[in-house]
Amino acid sequence: MPADEPLKIEDAVNDTCPWSGKPIAADALTLYRGAVVGFCNPGCRDKFETAVRHFEDALMARRSERAGNSE
């Protein structure tokens, strides 16, 4: 999916918000690993993006740590 193309609710891989269980909304979509994921509101979407960023940063730090220890 091109970066400049808006995300569409009909492309979402889910029908309900993974945080609340409520139906997803067109203004609360994000792209995750190439797939459109929907949330019930932008707050839930932002909470997801923050969590993903946190875990990705932690994984990168661990990989860097291990790479440094193996030298």
Image (cartoon, rainbow, N blue to C red):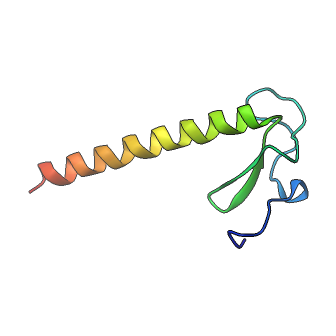
- Quadrant of res 58: top left
Q: Hey, which residue is sitting farthest bottom in the picture?
A: 2
Q: Hey, which residue is sitting farthest front in the picture?
A: 4
Which residue is at a point 50% across and 43% down the rendered structure image?
53
Which residue is at a point 13% across and 53% down the rendered structure image?
70
Task: Give the x, y percent position of residue 37.
Answer: 75, 49
Instruction: Specify the quadrant that holds the C terminus.
Output: bottom left
Q: How many marks?
A: 0
Considering only vertical position in the picture, is 48 above or below 26? above
- Quadrant of res 7: bottom right
Determine whether, in the image, residue 55 is placed left or right of residue 65.
right
- Quadrant of res 6: bottom right
Task: Give the x, y percent position of residue 28.
Answer: 79, 43
Residue nearest the viewer, comparing 4 with 54: 4
Determine whether, in the image, residue 39 is placed left or right of residue 2.
right
Task: Give the x, y percent position of residue 36.
Answer: 75, 56
Which residue is at a point 90% across and 36% down the rendered structure image?
23
Task: Give the x, y percent position of residue 35.
Answer: 71, 59
Determine whether, in the image, residue 65 is placed left or right of residue 61.
left
Determine whether, in the image, residue 52 is placed left or right of residue 3.
left
Which residue is at a point 80% across and 52% down the rendered structure image?
13
Q: Hey, which residue is sitting farthest top in the picture?
A: 20
Instruction: Specify the quadrant that holds the N terminus.
Output: bottom right
